[in-house]
Image (spheres, helix red, strand yellow):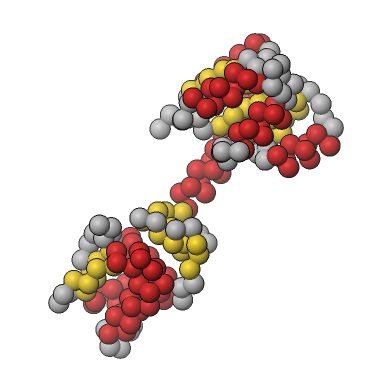
Amino acid sequence: METTILIADDEARMRKLIKDFLMQKGYKIIEAEDGLQALEIFEEESKIDLVILDVMMPKRDGWSVLRKIRETSKIPVIMLTARAEEQDELFGFELGVDEYITKPFSPKILVARVEAILKRVRGAEKQEKDYGGILIDEEGRTVKVDGKEIELSLREYELLKFLLDNENIALSREKILNNVWNFDYYGDSRTIDSHIKKIRHKLGKKGKYIKTIRGIGYKFEIK
């Protein structure tokens, strides 16, 4: 998957320096020579993954561009500035800057920061999986339905996760018991039915995705 980075800086020499180093890593680069052009490109291009913004630019400065971007997007933004005042940095973080790099800087350090931010963002995206409006965060062990977190017991969470992991597959009660309750459980398989009932209730309208397969067990299917 190609990663696209927008570089906005009024110095052509600076843009070329950053571009050359980033292209060596396989990134696609789009350039803007002022703040207005940066915004126009950002609004036209739907597949920009990260923005590198110089603070001091003609037509619209970096702060103004950042404010406008943050109205509609959480895209990672790195600010470049010739000023190293603490107040500027605090101001930048309040506006939603992900990284703040003071000129002059090492291009290799900038590349490392870009890679770290993209890795972090993609890691966060991978943690949360969407199943028809049911969002499950495996690391945080949380479940959201249409953006609202729901309370599940540990066993309910593990049962729902097993169903989601095996989407569109009919699962027998025995298989569910063996995988969710483990092999050491010798109780009545009807305990699965009672847990499914609770999960369906907590999922609200999304509960219909858990289908009952007569004579077998259950299946998670979005239809």
The quadrant of the picture occupied by the C terminus is: bottom left
Give the camera-side residue of 85 and 186.
85
For residue 32, say whether it is visible. Answer: yes
As drawn, 16 above or below 68? above
As drawn, 107 above or below 220? above
Give the camera-side residue of 113 and 198.
198
For residue 212, side relative to residue 180 (left or right): left
Give the camera-side residue of 196 and 105.
196
For residue 175, side relative to residue 104 (left or right): left
- Residue 30 x, y percent position in the rendering: 53, 20
The quadrant of the picture occupied by the N terminus is: top left
- Residue 20 x, y percent position in the rendering: 57, 17
For residue 127, side relative to residue 96 (left or right): left
- Residue 24 x, y percent position in the rendering: 52, 21
Q: Which residue is drawn at 52% across and 49% down?
A: 124
Q: In which quarter of the image is residue 55?
A: top right
For residue 136, say whether it is visible. Answer: no
Q: How many labels does the image show?
A: 0
Q: Residue at x 56, y 32 (%)?
A: 50
- Residue 221 x, y percent position in the rendering: 26, 60
Which residue reaches farthest left?
Answer: 215
As drawn, 180 above or below 49? below
Which residue reaches farthest top?
Answer: 12
Q: Residue at x 46, y 30 (%)?
A: 47
Q: Residue at x 41, y 76 (%)?
A: 155
As drawn, 189 above or below 32? below
Which residue reaches farthest bottom?
Answer: 187
Q: In which quarter of the image is residue 18?
A: top right
